[in-house]
Image (cartoon, rainbow, N blue to C red):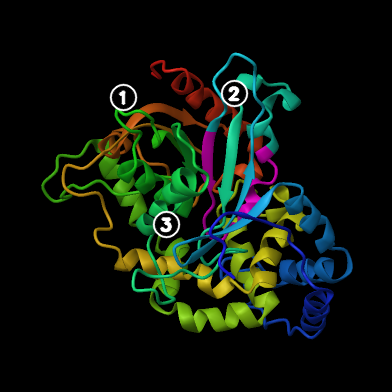
Amino acid sequence: MPYDTPEPFKVDIPESALIDLDERLRRWRPPTAIADGGTWAAGTDPDFLVELVDYWRHAYDWQRCQEAINRWPNYLVDIGPQRLHFIREPGSEVDGAPRPMPLVITHGWPGSIVEFLAVIDQLAHPERHGGDALDAFDVIAPSLPGYGFSGPPIRDDGTTGPIGPRAIAGLWHRLVHGTLNYRRPYGAQGGDWGAVVSSWLAFDHPVKDETDDWKSGVLGLHLNMTGVRPGIDLKTTALSPAEKLWLGQMGELDDRTAYQRIQATRPQTLGVALSDSPVGLAAWIVEKFRDWSDCKGDPTNSFSMDTLLDNIMVYWLTGTAGTATWLYRGVTQQKPRALPPGGRVQVPTAFAAFPADIAPAPPKEWLERIYELRRHTVMPKGGHFAALGEPDLLVEDIRAFFRPLRFGAAND
């Protein structure tokens, strides 16, 4: 049935799905290991995978994760033909102060809303965590189309298939402005695909002009990964030494980004493997959590086994491991992929650079070509999955950036 207005939703995975998973885990076939000492150099370490599967079978508790998701108000809604799942937690209100600013937080791949379970309360209710209630946000955390409890992506012609991040940004604005009926400015935050979607959201839907009777649009943008490319010709644009060095480093990342080419060119084939084998899915995902985090080579230095499996389980139990990869194909079909020539995100922007991300953070000069950069924070630690790995650092940076914006002050 269509959900024209948000319908409350509870995650309730049937016992039969958990029994099926247990049977598959019990029958899994460990791969032949390459004789390189199990160093992760050729992919997920087989010894680690054996340990993970053993924990998955004998110690992991899905009900704990399900209850953690259901702790928050979950909803399903149809925006046009696109079914979306989102969490919305209204922030604490203070008498005599402006109402909490809406904040759309967007995950990426291979993440999910599980990334945000530890930060929703801090963002919505800072006074519960030693903060100031004036920093509260109305937190809106959608699942990307094709991910988790959202429906598969729907293209403009109504067919099921890949869509790009700019199209998703349009859905997010309709969710905030139309579905949730906000008539006040909102913020956007994201890393990975969340950074790309949030950047297009700020570019296409900046806050309305002061002359309007109401204002609804992006007032501020906070990123922990760069989101879009500037609309410049690299062959003719004068670049700084730092930009040239960074672009050279980006060209050396083939070993860590090969997955992107597979997911962009053959998502249907890969989707069969990821949707049919829970251990294959786990191996595909956990390698990225290891490579892109500040874990010193051992994923459990940054994430517990439970956290790793919580995220994997959202993909497995919803059957979305295949459709989640479609976004890599969708972005290749998006025209244009970069900002138009001379285009720039005019919304005040903050960038938090975590040192152990998949790629080196771009220099400020590059960011300033794309964004109205107001805040640039070099974090002392942390990696790609900032909300999971370093939630306190991320939350404090978000609060500090939006604090003056919500009261109409400059943010230098």
Name the residue: 40% across, 50% down. Answer: 196
Q: Position of residue 338 (x, y in %)?
A: 26, 53
Q: Which numbered dot is residue 135?
A: 2
Q: Earlier in the sequence, mark 1 or mark 3?
A: 3
Residue type at mark 3 is Ile
**SS at circle 2:** helix
Q: Nearer the viewer, residue 400 or 355?
A: 400
Q: Position of residue 111 (x, y in %)?
A: 58, 57
Q: How many circles with numbers are drawn on the protein? A: 3
For the residues labelled 3 and 2, the Cα–Cα distance comes to 27 Å
Q: Which residue is mark 1?
A: 210
**SS at circle 1:** loop
Magenta highlight range: 102-120
Q: Earlier in the sequence, mark 3 or mark 2?
A: 2
Q: Is residue 217 above or below residue 141?
A: above
For the residues labelled 2 and 1, the Cα–Cα distance comes to 23 Å
Q: Position of residue 184 (x, y in %)?
A: 45, 31
Marks 1 and 3: CB-CB under 8 Å? Answer: no
Name the residue: 42% across, 46% down. Answer: 198
Q: Which residue is mark 3?
A: 168
